[in-house]
Image: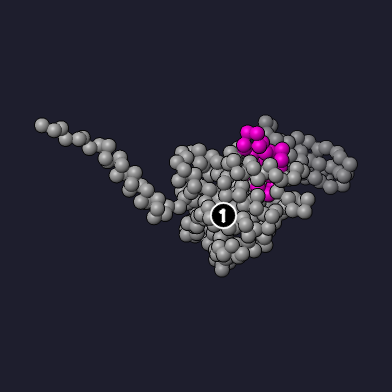
Amino acid sequence: MGITKRQDGLYVEFRVTDDGTCLRLDQSGKLKRWKVGGFDKKTAMNAEALIKTRLLSGQEQSPARSMTFAQLADQYLTLEHVQRARSQSHLWAIKALRDYFGSRPISSITTQDVIAYRASRAPRSIATINLEHTQLSTMLNAARRVFGWRGMNVAADVPKPDPKNSRDLVITQDQLMALMQAAAPHLRPLLLVAHDTGARRGELLKLEWADVSLERKELTLRDTKNGDTRVVPLTERCVAVLAGLPRGSRVFTFGGKPLRTIHGAFTAACRRAGIGGLRFHDLRHTAATNLRRAGVHTQIAMKIVGHKSDVMHRRYLSVSTDDLHQAADALQTHQATLITPEKKP
């Protein structure tokens, strides 16, 4: 501890520990400085005595305790794993949260505030509000683990209603062919690879040739939604269609430039193919269901499509009437093998 001189003035410094509520003197703690201002040593000595008294009495508030939500948002976005895995939807969620909580100290946010936030976001979908709610909980956890805050994660105590948004739309091979025939040429390869691999739209749009091996029939998806890197096998027809694409940096391009958006082209293709209510994400849903129907082990299928939990994977599986009849046929065949033929006298 002591007084130090810098170009912009005098500073008082002490070694302290931060328990998330207040700072306390600790010779083995981290060095913290307080700017006194100016170069008057007497003023600095008075400030030193005052700060020491506050540290000894537990009156020097922890910076983490007074952290506002806006400050948390700024620091959260600088974290390496956040920069690597963030998506546009998460950035929108953070902006919505920041607009609402703004300069509020995070220690002042209560469960009632979280409930009020959810109510303020109506009439947006429950799924959207749940995404923002989850983002708030994630950021409060980061405040505890990374930034030394010792408060409670009140967002985790507020239940999130089930959006009941699971979908069972699985397109057939005939529909896929019709969709590809109706699609613009630059969109067709993307549709096929999405259908056969279950990769997310964002994962494919940023896919680079350096991560594609036609010889090994696989591609590597990096910086995925889950923050992981995964290797995905390719079907023969995916290998064939990729082999015909021009080589550059990105795999999927339009007019020689990386393809960035497909909404208009995909909507037009669905309209021309006569397939209503289809979303690009349903191709991922279809891939997961087709893997199950092909008899691929659940853990392998989860690895291919990038699901980390059985619950999430099951949401992507559809069971049709044909599946049920095939199960009954399989059971009947199995039962037939258990019957012991009667011996003739």
| 219 is higher (above) or lower (below) than 151 | above
Quadrant housing the N terminus: top right
Closest to the observer, 217 or 87 = 217
Is 207 magenta? The answer is yes
The answer to whether one can see residue 56 in this image is no
- Where is residue 249 shown, x and y percent of the image? 76, 43
Under mark 1, the amino acid is: Leu
Horizontally, is 143 left or right of 172 in the view? right
- Where is residue 274 shown, x and y percent of the image? 57, 64
| 17 is higher (above) or lower (below) than 97 | above
Q: Residue at x 53, y 48 (%)?
A: 287
Q: Which residue occupies the extreme bottom position in the image?
A: 123
- Where is residue 231 shown, x and y percent of the image? 60, 37
Closest to the observer, 44 or 344 = 344
The answer to whether one can see residue 5 in this image is yes
Q: Residue at x 70, y 44 (%)?
A: 244
Quadrant housing the C terminus: top left
Read off the residue under disc 1.
Answer: 176
Q: Secondary structure at mark 1?
A: helix
Q: Which residue occupies the extreme left position in the image?
A: 345
| 44 is higher (above) or lower (below) than 264 | above
Magenta stretch, residue numbers: 204-224
Closest to the observer, 305 or 193 = 193
